[in-house]
Amino acid sequence: MYAYFSIAMYEAVLGGMPQHRSMAGQLTDLQPLPPPLHRGQIDWPSSLSASASMVLTSVLPFVSTTARGVLASANDARLAERRAAGVSQRSVDASVAHGRAVGAALVRWIATDGAAGAARPYVPPTGQPHLWESTPPNFRPAIEPYCSEVRTLILRSNDEVEPEPHISFDPDPASAFGQQARATYDQFFANTAETRAIAQFWTDNPGSFTPPLGTPTGLPSGHWMMICSQASRQLGLRLDDAVEAYARVGVALHDAFVNCWTWKYRFQLLRPVTYINRYIDPAWRSFINTPQFPEYTSGHSVASPAAALVLTDLMGSFAFTDDTHAGRQPARRFDSFNHAATEAAQSRLYGGIHYPMAIENGLDQGSEIAALVRARLRTRG
């Protein structure tokens, strides 16, 4: 969702950004997009809103009628703002037509990405002690088990970046594998108020509208898009630089999660809570509820450096305050995007939901994905 929404914003205003180039021909299967027919009449913010609104509505087919109304109202309000700023109705109309043409082309491309076919029932493998199984206290079905079937954008295959293999499973708590579980277990008792706050800050579970309210970020990908937004405001970025940042971060996050989930369901490794309950302490529960998908590698650890390195390439390294959870949790101050990424990854150990190796090797995996985005996706010149 974030990748497609951001690409829609970027491509809708590309005609007004002569120093930038289209992602068509660079992202997998993306063909040339419609150029503006009346370039001199185009109000680029109006085109952006029309394209982004169309694509977002398309990639959220499950949203309620009320939510669709909210999206439509947001687009209408943005166009009204442009008219109030002095943009003529003729220009608004031409701009909306261009944005919708770009959006329609993107919607056709998005429909072929494999995501629709990946939404089907799944039965996890059984019969071996190392295999993942649904975890307490939720015991819910596996999340995104067929994500490997979703088309990547820059990676040439969903498994192109291969993480370092995990330590071989061993039921003996004194073994090398057992020590990984012991490190997660011991961290639970070593946690301080600060480490618990870090674990909660990066939880990023889907939002809900009934108490207790979920986080507003829409998973770790949403959190990194919020960081991109906050950094753009802090630097006072112009529209062209801001949409470029969103689009590149969106692409990096998309491929990071597809790649990570491909390996999660290939390794099918059990979570620390399962190992600990079985071999160390049957009553133990992780500080943060363990998500319902296999262990290796850590999604936060892969996605965070992918986003952070792309942001650093575009914006440089500087201190910023992340107030993503304003009103729910205190803001956190970071020296750099890399600092935030490292903390996001480490938060999963503090939360008790990953072995250290899933975090350490996940960080390397995400950094390699960022390097490929840097090398293959050209948005300038």
Image (spheres, rainbow, N blue to C red):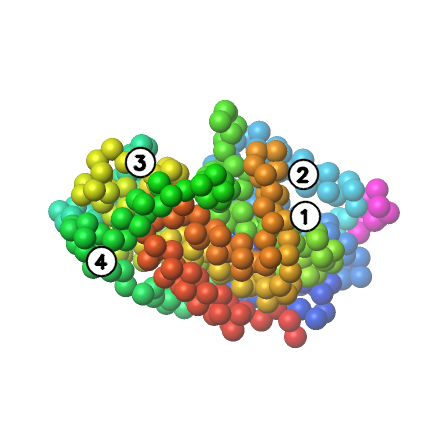
Amino acid carrying mark 2 in the image:
Ala
Residue that numbered label 3 is attached to: 285
C-alpha span from label 1 to label 3: 45 Å
- Alpha-carbon neighbours of circle 4 within 10 Å: few (<14), some, or many (≥20)? some
Q: Which residue is drawn at 70% across and 53% down?
A: 234
* Among the 4 quarters of the image, the one containing residue 323: top right
Q: Earlier in the sequence, mark 3 or mark 2?
A: 2
The furthest residue to the left: 127
Magenta-drawn segment: 83-91
Mark 4: secondary structure: helix
Residue that numbered label 4 is attached to: 176
Q: In this view, does 281 lie to the left or right of 303?
A: left
Give yes or no for contact between labels 1 and 2 (Cβ–Cβ under 8 Å).
yes
C-alpha span from label 3 to label 2: 42 Å
Residue 167 got which mark? none
C-alpha span from label 2 to label 4: 54 Å
Q: Is residue 85 magenta?
A: yes
* Among the 4 quarters of the image, the one containing residue 152: bottom left
Q: Earlier in the sequence, mark 2 or mark 4?
A: 2
